[in-house]
Amino acid sequence: MHHLIFNQGDASESRIYYCAHYLAESLGLYAAQRLKVSFTTSESGGHTIQGGQVPAVLSREADLTLGGPMVVMKHYQQHGAELQCFCASVAANPWFLAAARPQPDFQLRDLCGKRVLDVGNVGTASLTFRWLLAQHGLLEDVSILPGSGNAEDDFATVATGEVDYALHAMHALAPAITRGQLASVTSLAGLCGRVPWSAYIARSDVLHEKAEAFAAFATATQQALAWIAQHDATRLAERVKPWYPDYRFAALVSGLAAYQQAQVFAPDSRIPRAEFDHFSQLLGAIGWLDPSQPVPYDALVTQAGAES
């Protein structure tokens, strides 16, 4: 029996689009691979490479974590190829725009002259939204307002029409949508193109030392991702609900369905080179990465278990 310690960051990191490993545990897929996964947390998470789960991996307190390959890319530019992504999780931008009322014919150009409240204030998500607007020549025509730090207050501001749109992940939006306070307008997934938004991450040397365990993890996670593609959101919510005890079931179903429809979940454990390169170019364009220092796919991505 192999054993891996999985540090998930703090509680805020356990978003509903990060459900593949919970599903794998629920379905007994890790156990079937003779693998025990111990889920741990950190006192702090964060949206940078200093987030609580990354130091835990670097210090070997944990074997793996889950986060954006942008963290691995940034770490490479600062410290070299110490970390690698080895298994896919989220294959598209999980952020959405919501408004007070449905807008079935919404086009991105409809944001011209409007106010968007960036409720999440998450660095790469905010910068990516600005990149998207710039790609469509809208950056100077849209007012982006910072969130207050209280999502419920911000959602109320949008619901009353004081601000036109809310920008946030569906994890945060789904409860407000299911209670009728807001309506989903569009996913940013298709608008930004396929990118490896989130992946499982480990130290390169630990990946080598525990190659069989990581291959087992990736194989089981790939099976979980396939299960997500083959079942509806209600079945999925029933399976992962124990890991979201304070999340209303109706909101869980609604949020997971939105992510399935937007094809946010990775189709399998592979991290395609073209999608990685597209993401690195995007991150260079928004200033997250130094565009003069390329981030090599071969040094930062390994496909543990992809052949299974």
Image (cartoon, rainbow, N blue to C red):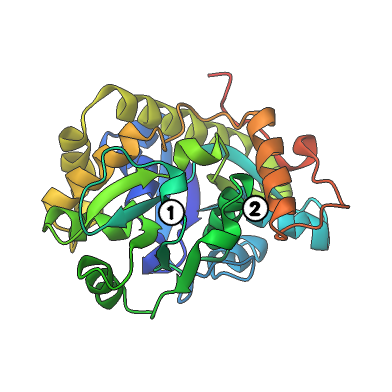
Q: CA–CA distance between discs 2 and 1?
A: 27 Å
Q: Residue furthest top?
A: 307
The disc label shown at residue 240, or none: none
Quadrant placement of the N terminus? top left
Name the amino acid type tagged 1: Leu
Question: Count of labels shown?
Answer: 2
Left or right of 264? Residue 274 is right
Q: Who's the residue at 31% across and 55% down the image? A: 98
Name the amino acid type tagged 2: Met
| Crowd band around label 1 with a 10 angstrom C-alpha radius: few (<14), some (14–19), many (20+) | some
Left or right of 10? Residue 141 is right
Report which quarter residue 272 is drawn in. Answer: top right
The disc label shown at residue 111, or none: 1
**Can residue 208 be spotted in the picture?**
yes
Tag 2 residue: 70
Q: Nearer the viewer, residue 100 or 36?
A: 100
| Disc 2 secondary structure class | helix
Report which quarter residue 51 is drawn in. Answer: bottom right
Residue 125, percent across and down? 52, 58
Residue 87, percent across and down? 55, 37
